[in-house]
């Protein structure tokens, strides 16, 4: 699911809102962002239903299925569109549970660019 639906929906938002403007000097394409947010919303609706039945995507245990969502979601949360997760309480709780893990926090700390 991640490779086929989640990443294709969330990655354009990350590129348009963070990578293109900050690293490439290209302005955000709002049309691409809007289309991707619509796709991501549909995916999150499915995830919300799934996460209403279990704590994590593959069950009540943290797995590679959850970890695989980390990179793009981490950067997505640095965009103005992170509030989308507020509309999905189980998805939001899932993300907060992932971010509360000490190993994930250590990994996240290394993903934040150093300020020169």
Image (tube, grey):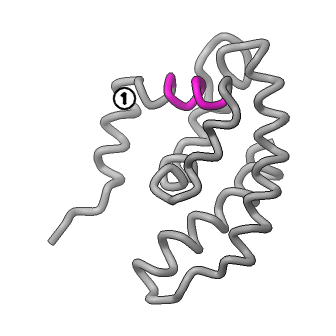
Instruction: For mark 1, give the secondary structure.
Output: helix
Q: Say if 102 sits above or below 10 in the image.
A: above
Residue 24 among those drawn in magenta:
no
**Residue 108 in the image: x percent, y percent?**
36, 43
Q: Considering depth in this image, is 33 or 68 the residue closer to the camera?
A: 33
Q: Tell me what residue is drawn at x 62 percent, y 13 percent.
A: 61
Q: Overall secondary structure of the magenta stretch?
A: helix
Q: Tell me what residue is drawn at x 64 percent, y 62 percent.
A: 11
When asked about the image quadrant of residue 7, the answer is bottom right
When asked about the image quadrant of residue 35, the answer is bottom right
Q: Is residue 68 left or right of residue 37?
A: left
Quarter the C terminus occupies: bottom left
**Residue 103 in the image: x percent, y percent?**
36, 29
Q: Is residue 20 left or right of residue 112?
A: right
- Image: magenta residue range: 91-97
Q: Tell me what residue is drawn at x 36 percent, y 41 percent.
A: 107
Quarter the N terminus occupies: top right
Residue 95 among those drawn in magenta:
yes
Mark 1 neighbour density, 10 Å: few (under 14) some (14–19) many (20 or more)? few
**Residue 68 in the image: x percent, y percent?**
61, 41
**Residue 2 in the image: x percent, y percent?**
74, 45
Number of marks in the rendered image: 1
Q: Is residue 74 left or right of residue 69?
A: left
Q: Considering depth in this image, is 17 or 103 the residue closer to the camera?
A: 17
Q: Tell me what residue is drawn at x 77 percent, y 28 percent.
A: 48
Most distant residue in the left direction = 116
Q: Which residue is mark 1?
A: 103
Q: Say if 3 sits above or below 99 in the image.
A: below
């Amino acid at each position: 699911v991640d490779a086929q639906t989640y990443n294709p929906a969330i990655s354009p938002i990350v590129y348009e809102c963070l990578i293109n403007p900050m690293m490439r000097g290209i302005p955000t394409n709002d049309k691409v962002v809007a289309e991707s947010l619509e796709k991501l919303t549909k995916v999150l609706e499915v995830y919300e239903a799934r996460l209403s039945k279990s704590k994590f995507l593959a069950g009540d245990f943290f797995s590679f299925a959850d970890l695989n969502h980390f990179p793009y979601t981490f950067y997505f949360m640095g965009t103005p569109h992170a509030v989308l997760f507020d509309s999905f309480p189980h998805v939001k709780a899932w993300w907060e549970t992932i971010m509360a893990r000490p190993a994930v926090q250590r990994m996240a700390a290394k993903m934040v660019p150093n300020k020169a």
